[in-house]
Amino acid sequence: MDPFNAVAEPRRREVLAVLGRGSGEYSVTELVKQLAWPQPLVSKHLAVLREVGVVSVEKRGRERVYSVNGEKLKTIYDWAKGFERFWEHQLGRVKERAERMARERHRAGNAKPGSAGGTNRSKE
């Protein structure tokens, strides 16, 4: 298995997401708490991620502490970056549409009868 196949599994991506938060280092016990999964399931996914080198482990006393090995994830990032222009274009279109709709709502709100500059204050 390679890093691409390893992170194709949604639960392994969840493990990586947790490992990417906070200090970036978690014991199996902490991961079990964060993910609310049974310990064998967490250990199974950690084993796969370790096997492909996406996750590193360090023994500290009686615990094993896991962290993300960014160097191995970079291969996935480098590959996906080649498609960035597609999502950048689509995100730009979504942003433009949202801004246009907000302007239209704002104009419609200001055009209501009895509205002076968008406020409804009575004169004293």
Image (cartoon, rainbow, N blue to C red):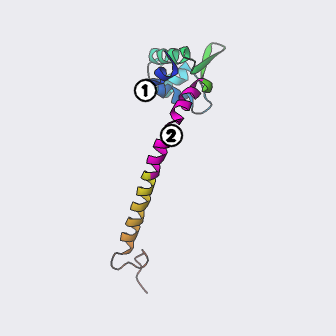
Q: Disc 1 or disc 2, which is closer to the eye?
A: 2
Given residues 79 and 104, the one toward you in this image is: 79
Kind of residue at badge 2: Glu
Given residues 51 and 40, the one toward you in this image is: 51
Q: Is residue 63 left or right of residue 92?
A: right
Judging by the rendered image, the residue that carries numbered circle 1 is 10
Q: Is residue 92 left or right of residue 68?
A: left
**Rendered residue at 43%/26% (across/down):** 10
Kind of residue at badge 1: Pro
Chain-order first, disc 1 or disc 2: 1
Q: Secondary structure at mark 2?
A: helix
Judging by the rendered image, the residue that carries numbered circle 2 is 84
Q: Which residues are magenta?
A: 72-92
Quick one: quadrant of the C terminus? bottom left
Location of residue 39 in the rendering, given as x and y in whole percent from the top left corner:
47, 17
**Does 73 appear in magenta?**
yes
